[in-house]
Image: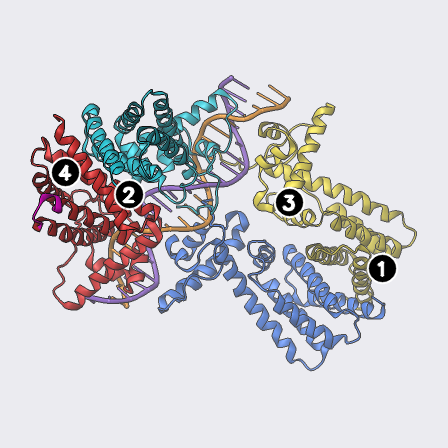
Chain colours: A yellow, B blue, C cyan, D red, E orange, F purple
Amino acid sequence: MATRASKQALRPRKAPTQGRAEETVAAIVEAAAQVLEQHGFEGFNTNAVAQRAGVSIGSLYQYFPGKDALTVALIRRESRAFHDDMAAALGMRSGKAALEYLIGACARQQLQRPRLARLLDIEEGRPAIQGEVSKAEIEQLVLTIVRRAAPAHPKPDVAAGDLLAMIRGMVDAAGERGEQDIHDLEIRLRAAVFGYLSRGSRARM
Amino acid sequence: MATRASKQALRPRKAPTQGRAEETVAAIVEAAAQVLEQHGFEGFNTNAVAQRAGVSIGSLYQYFPGKDALTVALIRRESRAFHDDMAAALGMRSGKAALEYLIGACARQQLQRPRLARLLDIEEGRPAIQGEVSKAEIEQLVLTIVRRAAPAHPKPDVAAGDLLAMIRGMVDAAGERGEQDIHDLEIRLRAAVFGYLSRGSRARM
Amino acid sequence: MATRASKQALRPRKAPTQGRAEETVAAIVEAAAQVLEQHGFEGFNTNAVAQRAGVSIGSLYQYFPGKDALTVALIRRESRAFHDDMAAALGMRSGKAALEYLIGACARQQLQRPRLARLLDIEEGRPAIQGEVSKAEIEQLVLTIVRRAAPAHPKPDVAAGDLLAMIRGMVDAAGERGEQDIHDLEIRLRAAVFGYLSRGSRARM
Amino acid sequence: MATRASKQALRPRKAPTQGRAEETVAAIVEAAAQVLEQHGFEGFNTNAVAQRAGVSIGSLYQYFPGKDALTVALIRRESRAFHDDMAAALGMRSGKAALEYLIGACARQQLQRPRLARLLDIEEGRPAIQGEVSKAEIEQLVLTIVRRAAPAHPKPDVAAGDLLAMIRGMVDAAGERGEQDIHDLEIRLRAAVFGYLSRGSRARM
DNA sequence: CATGAATGAGTGTTCATTCAT
DNA sequence: CATGAATGAACACTCATTCAT
């Protein structure tokens, strides 16, 4: 039957306790990444993912209760890497250095697998998925850094959201354009970020 | 999905000669907007659009050779409004005023029908559609304005791309968050835009 | 019709690995034969075939990438039987006996399931299918036999084509008329074939 | 509504009494011929025919109650020409000359517009059309000629059917192969026809 | 626990035919 | 009478999901 269970858990079906199962899950998630990356939304279907992972479609459903759960797992995997990278920014001495590190993390993340990152950004917005993946943590992180870097800013939470949005916008566009030069991109991102903050702090927002 | 003809015109199938037909075409495009807006990609199918437009599926295909052509028509409709609004910026006396007008146009456009705008931004990137809708014109427009507003900028074309991307990013995010206050958004956009430009001009990029 | 993918493989999609699958494939092909036979081109659609085969439409498309591929498979099945029968003619001692055997094979083949044979003859000519099924082998076979039976014939290749065409014409017509008496038909075919050859050899063609 | 009236007259809707109407009808029929010839069954639809005829689809349905009626009219037009040509054979002095003339008529007919002729041969066999077009007359004609040419033949009606079928088979195949040389084809047809008759008469059929 | 055959609702698209203008 | 906009049944084909083996 093709009916899609209206409300389905988006968490992996089982916490794989055995090593082999863990490998299988990882293989499936990576396969999902590759299929999405290479064939876009149009080609992103469970059968293709299973085949690419070298696993039967039945096995895929053994570990993931549905397609969306697989997508969520992929988003989580990418987010985790991103988050870990960003978290290092908190260790920086100055707020400015922290912000610069953060910018670098964004640029790195996006330019590594640009198409994948872009498509996942879109998936993240899907109502079926939204809420399952918490941008909250990352926004919290940025907020902390903004507070340190621009203590005078009247609305640090708004600023954090804006900065994230504008970095993401620029960095996605760069990925789409096929830019490779991370260094150049970082310089422009810094101009945007620090420009926004210095202006924003001055004004009475 | 039934088979999709490999290479299909994305241009409307026929120019309606009778008045009745023009109404039908407009109704279909508006229906497409509403369906996309309310039900997202998942619910955006030709049958739903036809039904919402109050016409038969056959009528839809009289005027649009395929689903993508319909999407393109919708994007064009929205782009035209946007473009016309932005073009008014060229008439401003100062470069700064032009840029500010441009920012306002973006904010207005996006906050009018935020979800629609966001989804169309994404559709625009689909390989099947890309190239049919020219971002070129809009980028050209922004470039002109950047040149006037920041004549000293070393790479005005890069800046134009960056500005568009960061405005789009911020404004999409605002729409997603459900922001309504255009005025506030505009202030923040100005901070971002002018901040980026002032920093960028100073540096040796 | 849903969109038809412009260029689609006409070969079966997958070689069934389980026994169950082989049965399914055979059932589908036989169902195709029956539907075509009973309802003609007009009634020959994939849903009807699947239903007749007692499988879901999805199963049909697991094994055949499209309707034409199914048709090709059916043609191949019938051709194989025909070809095997005809090939036995090569074992005959005299050329005359070989030709007579060949005539018999044609008559048998066509009168077994006359309507099916006729309709497949037509399908074979469809541009979408032509080339996928090689008449070449059969024509080669006839050519060999003609050379043995009428060594003096000045243009054996032309003769082979003519003979095949006239046999097919007569035998199709007989099938259409509902003739059952293979023996009588064979006698007339022999008159045509040997008549053509004896006249053709005499003349300076 | 798309329902096809189950039983519909296949006769033209109205005997056009005015000259203009007659022209329109003729234009539609010729358009049908051209569309069928150039685009095959797949492209043979009423809208295409109307457009090619330079007439609205509504007008087409003014003169023909349905698609099949149009097909029938086309078959009739071609049959008439063919019949008239063949009828001249009856004026020949000898039976042999009559048969030869008949063969020539067949060859001419088919090689003039080979694809059209072939496709119409197929259409003629469609149950929806069969019976509307009388092969009877033509078979009667051939029968008469066979009787004169081979008075000793035991089953002239069977022979007439066979001859027609084998001529049609050879001549269709020739058309399909793209043969142009009518003279050569006629020679081979004579070999087949006279060969068949001489053999058939000898035997006790 | 893995496999992959089977399912069928859903979707894009066509085209014969009707009918208001 | 001509027009062409409108109709909708019919059909090809996909893909998330299930379940017997």
Could you tell me residue B85's position as x and y percent?
A: 59, 72
Could you tell me residue D34's position as x and y percent?
A: 30, 57
Mark nearer the viewer, 1 or 4: 4
- Which chain is home to disc 1? A
Q: CA distance from mark 1 to mark 2?
A: 101 Å
Q: Which mark is residue C205?
A: 2
Determine crowd level at label 2: few under 14, some 14-19, many 20+ residues with C-alpha closer than 10 A.
few
The one of D25 and C117 positioned closer to us in this rendering: C117
Q: CA distance from mark 4 to mark 2?
A: 26 Å
Q: CA distance from mark 1 to mark 4?
A: 102 Å
Q: Residue at x 59, y 37 (%)?
A: A48
- Which chain is home to disc 3? A
- Which chain is home to disc 2? C
Q: Residue at x 65, y 78 (%)?
A: B90
Residues drawn in magenta: D92-98
The verdict on a common chain for dots 1 and 4 is no
Q: Quadrant of the C terminus of chain B?
A: bottom right
Q: CA distance from mark 4 to mark 3?
A: 65 Å
* Mark 1 vs 3, N-terminal side: 3
Q: Which mark is residue D160?
A: 4
Q: Is residue A164 visible?
A: yes
Residue underneath mark 1: A150
**Is B82 left, or right, of D54 in this rendering?**
right
**Is A50 left, or right, of C129 in this rendering?**
right
For the residues labelled 4 and 2, say whether their Cβ atoms are less than 8 Å apart.
no
Residue underneath mark 3: A38
Q: Is residue A1 visible?
A: no
